[in-house]
Image: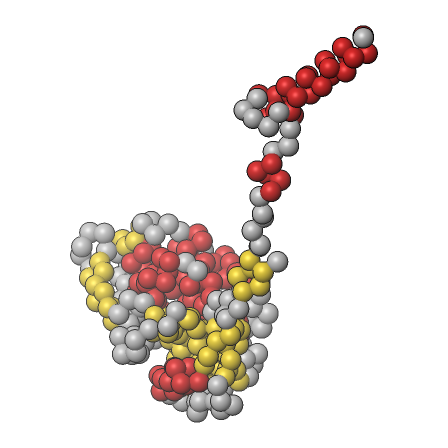
Amino acid sequence: MRLKFYLLFIFFTLLFLFYPGDSYYFHLFAYNREAINKTTPALKLKINPIPYLKLPYYPEVSAEGIYLVDLPSFTPVFSRNENLKLFPASTTKILTALVAYDIYKPDQVITVKKTITDGQLMRLVVGEKITVENILYGMLVYSGNDAAYVLADNYGYDKFVNLMNKKVQILGMKNSHFSNPNGFDSGSQFSTAFDLSLAARELLKNPYLSKIVSTKEITISDVDFKYFHQLTNVNKLLGEIQGLGGLKTGYTENAGENLVSFYKKNGHQFVIVILKSQDRFNDTRNIIKWIEENIEYYSFTAGT
């Protein structure tokens, strides 16, 4: 009799605890069936589309150093002597801008202590008080050598150049070295088409600097509105070719014609580096036409 009582007690206790209704004890002790039965969605790995050539031919270009790269995947599409050390000329100012952005605030006011008179100038005046932002416009839009010099001189010229070469190391520009922020030719001032694509990629990650290099023209002034500087972008292709977002020109007699460009087409992005060209603008036109005619993409998604 006692055994029967115990068995009944155990039966009803278990029924009370684990009856699949709204019992508190059921939710506390029983399975969470929803969690058990829930199907975990497959993990999808998005892979950037990979460019390929429809036909095995390349554009006609005069440049000695070329590097065309699909930006999101950083897949090279067309190259020539991409690791050949050449004079970068004013494409140097890409590095100058990256360092200036690291050490200055855009609204910081600099008093021009001294300036230079060589090459392309935005014509800063000694004693002029001007924001870093406006100096950057003068350097990246109009390629002002005096703008690059003032940014370096205000910080400490040698210290600034040292920071440029530290930035070179950080970006993995293994075949580059800089001895001045302007781009003047020097035996210790050199870069390559590949290395400059790395610098361009870094600049394009920065929306603020990207906006400046894509500016067609602008008029800026000092903080007292005494000196005005009308700046037109040296890159003639900006505004001529749809999808071209500017970047940086460069020229010296020894360097030849240099041009680093950012180009967008149908959602795809490219960096085009042209060094020591006989006609940098025509070379870039030919490459862009070739991109439009001969580049397609593999698109795929990997799932696990």
**Residue 98, quarter of picture:** bottom left
Q: In the image, 225: left or right of 26?
A: left
Q: Give 292 or 183, whichever is nearer the viewer.
A: 292
Q: Does 262 appear above or below 225?
A: below
Q: In the displayed orientation, state which residue is furthest to the top.
A: 2
Residue at horizontal 18 percent and vertical 56 percent from the top? 226
Q: Is residue 270 visible?
A: yes
Image quadrant holding the N terminus, namely top right
- Model colouring: secondary structure
Q: In the image, 225: left or right of 64?
A: left
**Residue 154, quarter of picture:** bottom left
Residue at horizontal 78 percent and vertical 12 percent from the top? 4
Q: In the displayed orientation, state which residue is furthest to the left.
A: 226
Residue 148 locus on image (x, y percent): 38, 64
Residue at horizontal 55 percent and vertical 84 percent from the top? 81
Q: In the image, 290: left or right of 21?
A: left
Residue 100 locus on image (x, y percent): 42, 57
Q: Does 102 appear above or below 115?
A: above
User: Total label count?
Assistant: 0
Q: In the displayed orientation, state which residue is furthest to the front.
A: 1
Q: Give 199 or 144, whichever is nearer the viewer.
A: 199
Residue 24 locus on image (x, y percent): 57, 21
Residue at horizontal 64 percent and vertical 32 percent from the top? 31
Residue 149 locus on image (x, y percent): 38, 64
Q: Is residue 280 visible?
A: no
Image quadrant holding the C terminus, namely bottom right
Q: Give 66 or 105, whichever is nearer the viewer.
A: 66
